Image: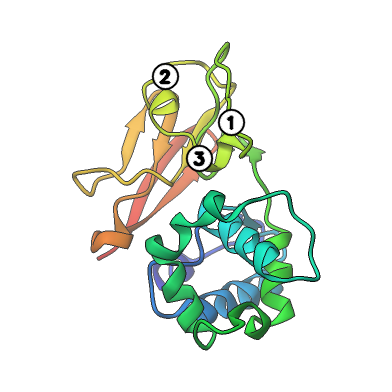
Amino acid sequence: MQQIHELPLAEDDRIVFVGDYVDRGPEVALTLDLLIQLRDQRPNTIFLRGNHDQSMMDVRDLLDPGRETELRFDDVSWWFQYGGRQTMASYGGENDWYRQVPPTHWQFLETTGMEHRESGYIFVHAGLLPKGMRWFDAADPRLWIREAFLESDDDFGGTVVFGHTPTRDGEPLVQPNKIGIDTGAAYGGPLTAALLEPDHIVRFLRAD
């Protein structure tokens, strides 16, 4: 974020986040505080939803007796192992942790979007379903898809900018129809942002 603010940003420049704001780190609550502050400062910022964000809300819906859900525990049990316990600890531990999450944090997560299209780009968390392919999971493919999208050379109607699947070499994935910016920050790799103009990549910003 420091590098982005030093560009500098024009008032009408747009920042787009591609999701997964929770899990994988000890400061989830502070991260959401930072993003909410940024949203208030730059209302044109786009916050998309990641599968970890969705799963945090799903676990809350399962645990909170005041909420109704058709999910089963098996649907979200993976979350506890893959970063969920770090998120719980950030809000005070395992006992009723979801009650300790400020309403502003839940509101932020609930208002994240699934997709944003602008200037020839399609921003999503994980990718898009290739043409003619069926998706048999109840979850939205834009939160979960991997190989079928990564291996596709479809024309999706724009260049798809996504995260979700970390690259093995720590470098952004750049193909004619897609740009992958997950360079493995959750595993000790750099955090990467793409600086984009309507017709080309200007450069990548990286925080090691």
The residue tagged 2 is 152
- Residue sitting nearer the eye, 111 or 160: 111
- Residue sitting nearer the eye, 111 or 205: 111
Q: Give the x, y percent position of residue 31.
A: 51, 76
Q: Earlier in the sequence, mark 2 or mark 3?
A: 3
| Residue type marked 3 | Trp
Label 1 vs label 3: CA separation? Answer: 23 Å
The residue tagged 1 is 120
Q: Quadrant of the N terminus?
A: bottom left
What is the secondary structure assignment of the residue under circle 1? Answer: loop
The residue tagged 3 is 144
Q: Residue at x 44, y 80 (%)?
A: 27
Q: Nearer the viewer, mark 1 or mark 3?
A: 3
Label 2 vs label 3: CA separation? Answer: 15 Å
Q: Residues at badges 2 and 3 in contact (C-beta under 8 Å)?
A: no
Label 2 vs label 1: CA separation? Answer: 18 Å
Instruction: Say left or right for 175 vs 41.
Output: left
Q: Earlier in the sequence, mark 2 or mark 1?
A: 1
Disc 1 residue crowd, few under 14, some 14–19, many 20+, Cα 10 Å = some
Asked whether the viewer can see residue 33, the reply is yes
Q: Residues at badges 2 and 1 in contact (C-beta under 8 Å)?
A: no
Q: How is the image coloured?
A: rainbow
Q: Quadrant of the C terminus?
A: bottom left
| Residue type marked 2 | Ser
